[in-house]
Image (cartoon, rainbow, N blue to C red):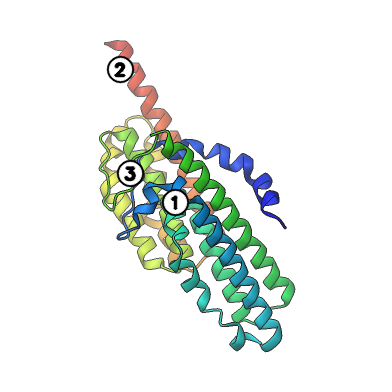
């Protein structure tokens, strides 16, 4: 498969995510390189790193075929990923694809460690490569928005929402990060983000939402405190956890619409 093939496959996906890059970007997991605030200047480097990663995966699979799992050294996969600049470029640009990359990395790693068939290993390799090229496309799109001044600088601190609508947007972003941390094999951190998001963001808009749709609030309370934490703690698949999150994000969108409508009606009254 070629780069162009992956670009064509994900063109629609990338275009529909364009709006994500107009919102402030925050990063709360420690320092990142200044390169993430100059994406256009580093696109060639990112592209080279994606090619390098793909080559390393191919070499690992070849070693597996020649000498087994010990020769393959699958533990190096995560080290390779974490040492490239592209790692933080995609994490600060589009978290959902970032999560898919981790899913792909552990898919290849697990298939090698379990000595799966070469067909299964190649299947996981294709998923990883697809995620990497999709991520590169997302970073290129983010670079365009950054060049137009439509994004804010990446910061290592959380930005407090100034109103309920911004809080709901922040909640959706945090839910994406939950999936990413689960994909990184960090379930405790994922659950911690769930609880923190509920206590510090959702509880702040509950009162306003209850008067508009009490059942919706009750559903989301259960999602935050029972459904999503249990899905993570019981070791469900990444796709299953992602489905729970997507369902919650749909409910958040409903809440967003309700608050917008309520605000418009109040405006009309006055």
- Dot 1 corresponds to which residue? 176
Determine the image quadrant of residue 228: bottom left
Disc assigned to residue 266: 2
Q: Residue at x 40, y 47 (%)?
A: 38
Q: CA distance from mark 3 to mark 2?
A: 34 Å
Q: Earlier in the sequence, mark 1 or mark 2?
A: 1
Dot 1: within a 10 Å radius of its alpha carbon, few (fewer than 14), some, or many (20 or more) residues? many
Q: Residue at x 72, y 58 (%)?
A: 1
Disc assigned to residue 236: none
Which is more toward the observer, 197 or 166? 166
**128, above or below 90, in the image:** below
- Dot 3 corresponds to which residue? 153
* SS type, badge 2: helix
Q: Earlier in the sequence, mark 3 or mark 2?
A: 3
Which is more toward the observer, 227 or 113? 113
* SS type, badge 3: loop
- Residue 128: % across, % down: 60, 62
Can residue 144 be spotted in the picture? Answer: yes
Dot 3: within a 10 Å radius of its alpha carbon, few (fewer than 14), some, or many (20 or more) residues? some
């Amino acid at each position: 498969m070629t780069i162009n093939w992956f670009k064509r496959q994900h063109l629609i996906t990338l275009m529909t995510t364009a709006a994500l890059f107009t919102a402030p970007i925050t990063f709360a997991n420690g320092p990142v390189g200044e390169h993430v605030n100059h994406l256009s200047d580093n696109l060639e480097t990112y592209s080279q790193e994606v090619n390098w990663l793909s080559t390393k995966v191919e070499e690992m699979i070849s070693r597996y075929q020649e000498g087994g799992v010990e020769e393959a050294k699958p533990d190096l996969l995560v080290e390779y990923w974490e040492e490239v600049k592209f790692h933080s470029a995609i994490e600060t640009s589009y978290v959902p694809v970032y999560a898919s990359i981790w899913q792909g990395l552990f898919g290849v790693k697990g298939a090698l460690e379990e000595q799966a068939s070469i067909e299964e290993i190649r299947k996981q390799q294709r998923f990883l490569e697809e995620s990497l090229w999709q991520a590169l496309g997302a970073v290129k799109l983010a670079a365009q928005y950054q060049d137009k001044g439509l994004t804010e600088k990446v910061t290592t601190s959380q930005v407090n929402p100034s109103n309920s609508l911004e809080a709901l947007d922040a909640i959706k972003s945090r839910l994406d990060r939950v999936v990413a941390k689960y994909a990184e094999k960090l379930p405790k951190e994922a659950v911690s983000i769930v609880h923190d998001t509920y206590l510090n963001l959702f509880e702040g808009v509950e009162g306003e939402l209850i008067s508009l749709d009490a059942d919706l609030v009750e559903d989301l309370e259960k999602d935050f405190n029972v459904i999503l934490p249990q899905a993570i703690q019981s070791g469900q698949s990444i796709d299953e956890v992602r489905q729970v999150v997507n369902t919650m994000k749909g409910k958040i969108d409903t809440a967003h619409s309700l608050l917008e409508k309520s605000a418009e009606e109040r405006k009309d009254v006055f």
